[in-house]
Amino acid sequence: MGCTTLLVGKNASNDGSTMISRTDDGFFGVKKLVVMDPKHHKKTYKSVISHLEVALPETALRYTACPSVDETHGVWAATGINEKNVGMTATETITSNPRVLSADPLVRLKKPEKRGEKEIPGGIGEEDIVTLVLPYIHTAREGVERLASLLETYGTYEMNGIAFNDENEVWWMETIGGHHWMARRVPDDRVVVMPNQFGMDSFDLADAFGEKKDHLCSADLREFIRDNRLDLNQNGAFNPRDVFGSHTDMDHIYNTPRAWFMGRYLTPFSHRWDGPDAEFTPESDNIPWAFTPDRKIAVEDVKYLLSGYYQGTPYNPYTGQDTGKRGMYRSIGINRTGVTSVCQIRPDKPDPIKGIEWICFGSTAFDALLPVYPNVPKMPKYLSEVTLDVSTENFYWGTRLIGALADANYATSIQFIERYQNAVMTEGRKILREYDKKIAEGEDPSVLIKANEKLCEMAKKQTTETLGKVLHDASLHMKNGYNRADN
């Protein structure tokens, strides 16, 4: 599953908020945004993919989730914010290497091959992780600690990256083989870019085995590295990416170019990204995991980056110029994205409105990012009542339709897309200002239900109007167009 993650520390953002964001790039999986009520809490969770049963804590918190509409293959909750204003996104599929995977194999479901044999369940994975963790944590660090316990107990059947945030901290966690893991607190002044590879390029083992201030890891990680001769580093340096990650030809087409595009945007002056003297190219293996951006980063920047398709470079698949490099690298904004979210936690707001979940569906290159208040008992029907049937009555299908039509007619439709994206963001921010003020003035938090309805009414109006425009534009470019004056 190819996704892209972007993490923003509180001193790197324009308003002091922390942000974690990810494109959930499934295979056109239909998604919705819902609120999970703890009164429906179950005592046991069973995974569809790995057939694993996990006992759950006695009590749970309310949280938002973006599950699959078709749960044939599991819930796949993807992302959310709980009532304690802790955000989570899971998972970013990451890479590893045979040295790691042979030393600590992935824990996959083993079905009986002969009569009389018992099935052996697999570990946990992307299907399960948000559901198993987010309802039970009160801080971002607690998220790392709970997931670490689950990994050590049950293992995982895939390599995953997971992000957590609260009003003070952002934590990034990466799995190592079947049972091992490591996690870092994102420095407050940094932005992290993660394009489907093992990301961390530095790690303080002394802190992880000492004060544990900014680094956490498996209790036996040092022995695991030593006993399996995993350390490829020189001169005493420790780069986890070299030890646990990959450096393949496919990385240079599918992964590292995305890090290059994001880094280029974040630090256009601090680093050289183009030309013969470039410090980093789209195929560099040493693009940093985290950057101090040249300017503060806002939600609009996060959306732009997660919509990226190499605008302003020879690799843009939509360019009208014959660059010889058009479309050669995997874009960030792709056709099969199900949902993209930005979990934003604002430290200067009252608890009911600290969290804002910005959400969009379909290809990020063509959709619009809508903010909602997550600390509510339910979401509007426009976001939550999505079916497998195509319909303009919900945000998911409306934006999917816009993307499919605009992609085929990019040159003439992009003007409508840019206006649509700006309108939803602008009007969304206006409504947030209105209801932030109401809460600050003492109104009951139940008013946030009305706020979300108002946000969705606005999004539906903008989406319907834009769909009409791109549909008309696409109709003008149909191959069977003909007029009598054409002869």
Image (cartoon, rainbow, N blue to C red):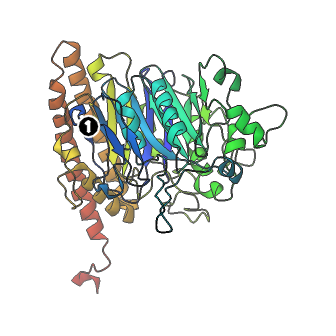
Residue at x 28%, y 87% (from the top left corner) = 487
Name the spot of residue 113 as percent of width and height, x first.
50, 67
Pinpoint residue 229: horizontal percent, then vertical percent: 78, 43
SS of the residue at dot 1?
Answer: strand
Q: Residue pushed farthest top?
A: 441
Residue sticking out furthest to the front: 116
Q: Is residue 100 above or below residue 202?
A: below
Along the line of sight, which residue is nearer the eye, 452 or 176?
Answer: 176
- Residue tagged by mark 1? 36
> Vertically, is 389 above or below 264?
below
Q: Count residues near mark 1 (Cα–Cα under 10 Å), then give few for <14, some for 14-19, many for 20+.
A: many
The residue shown at (46%, 58%) is 119
Question: Could you tell me which residue is drawn at 16 percent across and 35 percent down?
Answer: 454
The residue drawn where x is 34% and y is 62% is 404
Q: Amino acid at mark 1?
A: Met
Is residue 265 shown left or right of residue 448? right
Can residue 279 be seen from the camera position used here?
no
Q: Is residue 342 left or right of residue 285?
A: left
Q: Position of residue 53 (x, y in %)?
A: 39, 45
